[in-house]
Image: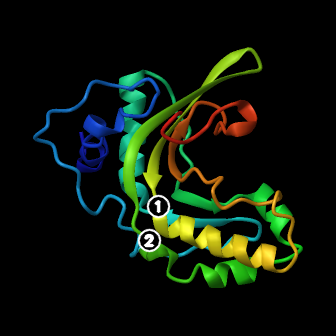
């Protein structure tokens, strides 16, 4: 097992706090979480045209992906990168009349220095085309990202945006580890928070 997988699996003793099926028994408590696991300051910010995301180190996520495949005995799709979505494409569709992506990206200057704290490992399941599909993700606390969403919401409303169209509180920060066929989200009935 590589060191990145060990770092990921070190999360298991406290990650199984999500109201979800824990994918394995906790590791020996002598395995400690590497403090650099969510240090994204060295990662390059990647601007996108219709959403905002914070890039996080991929190697630990890939190690966890590979270990989950072994432990769960299933094949998981990897994105080939890791991030926390801050503004989703559907949210941006509602925001763009009052605040464009350049302004949102400018507000996000320094996003890569945001502190992320892992909370739990989540597993979402849903039936898609008569087959059970799964997605695995690490739920994180991200106060800096929530504050960024609050500022986006403030500007949106200040410019006459409909308060019902965007809520900074409807934010479920997570890092997707892998999924069986598609990354499941709320439209499939999968929430990605501590209640998942």
Q: Position of residue 35 (x, y in %)?
A: 24, 61
Residue 39: image quadrant is bottom left
Q: Nearer the viewer, residue 83 or 15?
A: 15
Q: Position of residue 141 (x, y in %)?
A: 44, 55
Q: Are marks 2 and 1 in contact (CB under 8 Å)?
A: yes
Return the residue found at the far top: 130
Q: Report which residue position mark 2 lands on.
A: 114
Q: Secondary structure at mark 1?
A: loop
The answer, for residue 70, to whether it is visible in the render is: yes
Who's the residue at 81% across and 68% down the image?
Answer: 95
| N-terminal label among 2 and 1 | 2
Crowding near pointer 1: few (<14 within 10 Å), some, many (20+)? some
Residue 153: image quadrant is bottom right
The answer, for residue 100, to whether it is visible in the render is: no
Who's the residue at 44% across and 71% down the image?
Answer: 114
Who's the residue at 72% across and 83% down the image?
Answer: 103
Who's the residue at 65% across and 32% down the image?
Answer: 181
Q: Report which residue position mark 1 lands on.
A: 142
Left/right of residue 189 with respect to residue 18 in the rendered view: right
């Amino acid at each position: 097992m590589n060191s990145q997988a060990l770092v990921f699996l070190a999360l298991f003793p406290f990650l199984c706090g999500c109201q979800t099926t824990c994918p394995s028994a906790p590791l020996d408590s002598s395995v400690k979480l590497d403090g650099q696991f969510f240090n994204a300051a060295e990662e390059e910010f990647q601007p996108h045209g219709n959403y905002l995301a914070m890039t996080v180190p991929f190697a630990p996520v890939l190690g966890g992906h590979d270990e989950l495949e072994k432990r769960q005995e299933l094949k998981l799709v990897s994105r080939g990168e890791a991030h926390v979505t801050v503004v989703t494409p559907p949210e941006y569709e509602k925001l763009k009349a009052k605040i464009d992506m350049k302004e949102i990206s400018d507000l996000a200057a320094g996003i890569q220095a945001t502190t992320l704290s892992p909370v739990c490992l989540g597993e979402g399941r849903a039936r898609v085309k008569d087959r059970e599909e799964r997605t695995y993700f690490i739920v994180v606390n991200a106060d800096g990202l929530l504050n960024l969403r609050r500022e986006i919401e403030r500007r949106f409303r200040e410019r006459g945006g409909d308060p019902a169209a965007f809520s900074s509180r409807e934010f479920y920060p997570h890092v997707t580890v892998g999924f069986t066929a598609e990354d499941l989200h709320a439209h499939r009935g999968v929430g990605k928070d501590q209640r998942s």
